[in-house]
Amino acid sequence: MEISTGGIQVAVINKADASLYDIHPLDRIKIKYGKKNTIAVVNTTNDKNIPSGIIGLFEEPIKKLGLKDGEHINFEVAPKPKSLDYIKKKLDNKPLIYSELKQIINDIVNHRLSDVEMTYFVSACYCNPLSTKETVFLTKAMTEEGQILKVGKPPIVDKHCIGGIPGNRTTMLIVPILASAGLIIPKTSSRSITSPAGTADTVEVLAEVCIDLKKMKEIIRKTNGCMVWGGALNLSPADDNIIQVEKPMSLDSESQLLASIISKKLSVSSTHILIDIPYGPGAKVETYEKAKDVARAFESISKSLKVFIKTITTKACSPIGRGIGPALEARDVLWVLMNDNKQPYDLREKSLNLAGIMLEMGKKAKLGKGKEMAEEILSSGKAYNKFIEILKAQGLKIKDPNKIPLAKKTFTIKAEKNGKIIRIDNKLISKIARVAGTPQNPSSGIFLIKQCQEKVKKGDNLFTIYSDANDRMKYAKEIVKENIIYHIR
Amino acid sequence: MEISTGGIQVAVINKADASLYDIHPLDRIKIKYGKKNTIAVVNTTNDKNIPSGIIGLFEEPIKKLGLKDGEHINFEVAPKPKSLDYIKKKLDNKPLIYSELKQIINDIVNHRLSDVEMTYFVSACYCNPLSTKETVFLTKAMTEEGQILKVGKPPIVDKHCIGGIPGNRTTMLIVPILASAGLIIPKTSSRSITSPAGTADTVEVLAEVCIDLKKMKEIIRKTNGCMVWGGALNLSPADDNIIQVEKPMSLDSESQLLASIISKKLSVSSTHILIDIPYGPGAKVETYEKAKDVARAFESISKSLKVFIKTITTKACSPIGRGIGPALEARDVLWVLMNDNKQPYDLREKSLNLAGIMLEMGKKAKLGKGKEMAEEILSSGKAYNKFIEILKAQGLKIKDPNKIPLAKKTFTIKAEKNGKIIRIDNKLISKIARVAGTPQNPSSGIFLIKQCQEKVKKGDNLFTIYSDANDRMKYAKEIVKENIIYHIR
């Protein structure tokens, strides 16, 4: 039928046939072809292209069975997956044991649950939050149902940032600092979903990020670290399916968030994990109290999982760094690594803080001496050298910050009054950057000429929008006109 | 694209285009064509049949816009329906007000919510049960979003049975008794979903049941009553969509059940409603305690809705009547109405009890005198005459019980020991009848030669299976062999 769901197996049956065999929409049938078989969810149709006696199959079952058009198949009614009972149990607010959560995740990974059924699982976990014990079970199950990378002996360090702050490209500074100090850091990152850029998008400006598990292992063996796109690997694969059904409702249950993040770290065998929780208006976590709650939740599951998790909460009322968008962020990172005087000092400072903590976690620095060591590695150029070494292993594209292509059209916004910048609106900066073209066009975005806490005079340049499309630039300007981006007092 | 979802508008966009316009799967777009427009949910594809610049549309938007293949359309990103915020509110266990529930139901009826989004609503109502106040709001909203039938002045009587008991075809006896006594009873019934027959399936053996609202009104004006299929009308249309997503999980939240039943009664302007709640193993309500809970819930919403609701709970460990399946049940009903000595007395007795209560509710009989009056109407043949009058108005097919076609193959099961029948398994009787061919083949089913409480001797005939298909009969026999259907002690 040349239709694909992206995972779930679907079979389409004529309504008359469905009635004859007492099959209802969303029932399951086991389709047999030769020695192969698969289980598909039934849709019914009155479409004249699928008359009685003909079964229509989506691409997934066709691929799985190795079928061609017009072949004969047999089918029988299949039982419902066992995990539906466990999802019902959670809807009834009863705790799930490990084997039950494992079965649910197994059925999700193997595309045995429909979107509606997965939604019931997500709703159940949202309305009847998982206990710490259940969250640990879920994290383990999500890890075990995917690939697991084994590389070197502990400590294997890792970091994750609970997002929402534009810029903030600390990973690309921390990885080379730690790798240079001899720590193994198998870092996987995501692409942007709703932000102007994910770390994977920014690294991709300079090198390849679509790297398989085997290649990733080689790179880490050679350089101690990597900066690859997690989506190209099969780590914790249930997560993507779950996120897909969470999106329409923008749901974010704490236990799912924890399991999602930590399972991906366990998949690369990380033993020491730093969780950065920036909070502030526009961030994923908006208040200090909520940031502390999230921190406690991470710490509470760490013991049972036998990993060392440290959290850090920092206030962030503005973007971190000057560039917003893959190209402009990559340029910032290179400037910091090259100790160039155009570097954004807030990004440098934050990265050194995080790297310092991680050097202490990995026992490379004594307590209280981590930041000093990170500073030395960065200032000496060792971090830059390690960065280029890792990028070369991943397939280096550009290393000169002046050669990074930027969008051709620019528009600069000026201050309308004298004063001090007390806040730069994170959500509006993200929105304008996306309207300008990020992340699809990596060369577009925003460059912050003035940063938070700086004093400005009326008429001073505040920030520049980069775009390659006239209509995008026009719409970006409209947003600027209708909103206050820089709060000056 | 010749694909239909059965309601929701779907547009399919090439992944490259989706990325360019920053549109994600499950986002909504507003499609404009001339002066018409519609909002569709986006799926993305790599299908070569939908290259960049081409948009694929399912049948629903094509029909709504009046499009032909190859025409040009414009689209823009559309905002999410407001009801998603209200569904999120309920997921967060906050009470919903009338306008919010009304918006949710309005969006469901107008196919603005995807299956996943509706599932969140159903889950939220299941995990965070609606209060009595919210249930009343939901019931009103469900009623108002559909057609409303106005016919005559109060009292307008109605009845509903919370199902699960095979046979039990009381509606076809109660309607003619009450209509004959001068009460208006605009009865709509459902078809079977998981049972051997719904009342609509059984009536359909004798007359037409697919009747529109205008015709239904005419029939009631002429005869005081009707027995039509509710699914052919547009009464409380949100209900069918909600039931569709409840099915995979067999969810049955009490508030949804209440709103579903009562909204359909309010749609036909019923003012006095009797709810029959049989309980027992295999019934929808299994215990006396649960039956009492359900009864209380119905009574608690009745005041705010300004309808008079009475409930009756009766124990039912076995089918009611002798026939199971549309044809055999229709024959039972005719036998009772004709006072034939082959009539099942349990069905007669139960129907008289219910009709008696309703005659009292409708003020046609004094308190305690209803059953007597019902008995007189039935015994005198007045009920039979009214039944035939209503069936004629609906398009009579058969009125002679001996001319109802039954399936050709029969198999009779004999008692294996002496004793008294203490229980006949409702679930197994339903299963065997469905395997034999009901409700698709209305002539198939089961005839209970011996009923509950009767004494039997080894070798006595217990029940006969009717089927038209050899394989179905074979499978039915297997179920008989592997299970105890009649419990004899």
Image: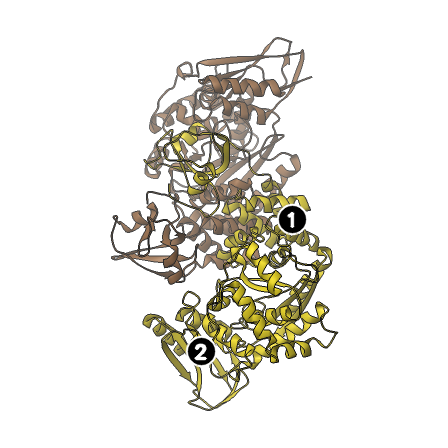
Chain colours: A yellow, B brown
Which amino acid is tagged 1? Answer: Asn
Q: In the structure shown, which secondary structural element does the residue marked by tag 1 occupy?
A: loop
Is residue A366 visible in the rendered image? The answer is yes
Give the left or right position of residue B34, taking residue B205 as reference: left
Residue under circle 1? A93
- Give the Cα separation between the discs numbered 1 and 2: 57 Å
Give the residue at mark 2.
A402
Picture quarter with the C terminus of chain B: top right
Q: Position of residue B151 (x, y in %)?
A: 38, 40
In the depicted structure, whether residue A82 falls above or below residue A380 = above
- For label 2, the SS is helix
Which chain does tag 2 point to? A
Q: Is residue B344 visible to us here?
A: no
Tell which circle, 1 or 2, labels the residue nearer the N-terminal end: 1
Q: Where is residue B16 in the image (x, y as percent from the top left)?
A: 38, 58
Q: Which residue is drawn at 64% across and 53% down?
A: A139
Quarter-wise, where is residue A388 in the image? bottom right
Of residues A311 and A95, the one drawn nearer to the viewer in this rendering: A311
Name the one closer to the observer, B27 or B441. B27
In x, y percent, where is residue B8? 39, 48
Position above or below: A54 against B417: below
> Measuring 58% from the left and 58% from the top, which residue is drawn there?
A218
Q: What residue type is labelled 2?
A: Asn
Report x, y in % for residue A197: 48, 67
Which-is-in-front pick, marks 1 and 2?
Answer: 2
Left or right relative to A445: residue A308: right
Q: How crowded is mark 1: few (under 14 residues within 10 Å), some or many (20 or more)?
A: some
Q: Residue at x 66, y 51 (%)?
A: A140
